Amino acid sequence: MNNNMHFTIAMIAFISSSLSVSANEDLLISTDLDSVSNSNVKYIVGIEKTEALSTALTADERERLCVKENDRYERNFPIWAQDAIDLGYELPKPYGFSISYMKMDQPLVVDSVAFSGISTRIDQFVKIGVSTAKQESETLTLRGDVWVLPFLNVYGILGSTQGSSTAMVSPVIDLGRLGPKKIGTYAFELDFRGITYGAGTTIVGGIDNWFALLDVNYTNTALDILDGEISSIVVSPRVGYRWKFKGHDMQLWTGAMYQNIEQTFEGNLSDIGVRLPGKWGNGKFKVEQHLEDKWNTLIGGQAQITHNLDLLMEAGVGTRRSVLLSLGYRF
C-alpha cells in the first residue's frame, strides 16, 4: 500500500553519487615534461613507462615524475577504475551512506473489500462495491551503496514507513428476489506502519556535462499492524546536467518513475476500530487494491556541500505527488 517507501528507495537509489560520473576533459598528460628535449621520455598517469628515466631530467623533474607514477588508484572498488581514469573520467568516491525522508500522497483503486468470520449470512450476502482511495505516507530510510564498476552502483536499503489510506466504500446487500440494495457510503480507513527493506542497482553514463541514469530496485514492507506485506518494483530513468559552482559539484535533472504494486491487506476488524458484539467480535477484513497511475514525473537537484557531503532534493508531480530530501556521505 505505502509505495512511498518504495519511491524513497527508488529515488534514494540514485541519490548517492549515481549522478556524479561524468567525463573530465582535462587530460592527464604531465605538462612537466613538455619542455624536456629527450623524446624517449613519455608518461601518462595510469600507464606504466616502458623506458627508463632520462638522465637529462633535472632532480625536481624526476621527483615530480615519480610522484605521478605512483599516483594510481589502489582501492578495490570500482573495478576497472584505473582504466576509466586513464580515459579521462572523474569517478565518485566508491562507498556511500545516505539518510532520506519522503512524504507522498497518491490515489489507489480498491478492487475489493470483503469480510469474514462475522456470520455466514452476512459474509455471503454483503459485498463492498469497488471504489477509489487516497493514501498518505511518510518514510525514513537509510541506504548504503558501493560502485562495483565505474558505471554500476549497487545498494541496500532499510527504512520505516507509516501512513493511512481512506476509501469510500458502498456496501451492497443481496436481498434475493428483490435484488441488490446499496445501504450507504462509508469511509473505510486503515492506518499502517512497517519496516521496509530491499536492494537495487543504478547504471550511469555521461557525455561532457550531460548524464543519464537508470535505477531499478525491489523492496518489501512487512506490516506490524495489519497482516500481509507490500512488495514493489520501481524503475526510474533520469537525464540531467552538472556543473561547478565555486568549486562545488551541482546537478539538475528530470525523469520519470514507474511503480508496479498490488496490495492486499488483511486483519481483524477490532484492530481498525470496528468492534462487534459477541461472537461477531472475531470478524476479519480483506482489502485488495492497486495504484491508479503507475507513472509520474520527477524533478530534482543535488548540491555538494563539502568534499564528502551532499544534499539532494526531488519532487514528484502528477497524479502521484511526493517530496524527497536526502543527505549523503561518500568516502
Image (cartoon, rainbow, N blue to C red):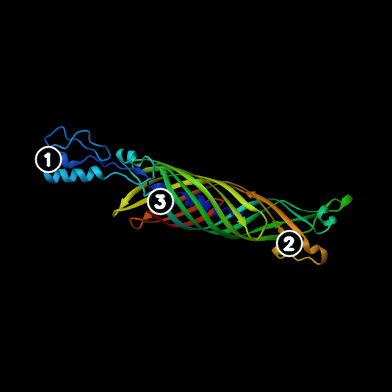
First of labels 1, 2 by sequence position: 1
Residue 164 drawn at (x, y percent): 62, 60
As helix, strand or loop, the secondary structure at mark 3 comes to strand
- Mark 1 residue type: Leu
- Within 10 Å of the Cα at label 3, are there few (<14), some (14-19), or many (20+) other Cα atoms? some
As helix, strand or loop, the secondary structure at mark 2 comes to helix
Report the Cα–Cα distance between label 1 and label 3. Answer: 40 Å
Residue 202 drawn at (x, y percent): 46, 44
Q: Nearer the viewer, residue 321 or 305?
A: 305
As helix, strand or loop, the secondary structure at mark 1 comes to loop
- Mark 2 residue type: Leu
Report the Cα–Cα distance between label 2 and label 3. Answer: 46 Å
Residue at mark 1: 57
Between circles 1 and 3, the one closer to the viewer is: 1
Residue 120 figure quarter: bottom right
Residue at mark 2: 269
In this picture, residue 292 sits left or right of residue 155: right
Residue 210 figure quarter: top left
Residue at mark 3: 95
First of labels 2, 3 by sequence position: 3
Task: Determine which of the numbered discs, if any, sits on residue 88 in the image.
Answer: none
First of labels 1, 3 by sequence position: 1
Residue 47 drawn at (x, y percent): 27, 37
- Within 10 Å of the Cα at label 2, are there few (<14), some (14-19), or many (20+) other Cα atoms? many
Report the Cα–Cα distance between label 1 and label 2. Answer: 86 Å
Q: Nearer the viewer, residue 327 or 145?
A: 145
In this picture, residue 283 sits left or right of residue 40: right
In this picture, residue 122 sits left or right of residue 251: right
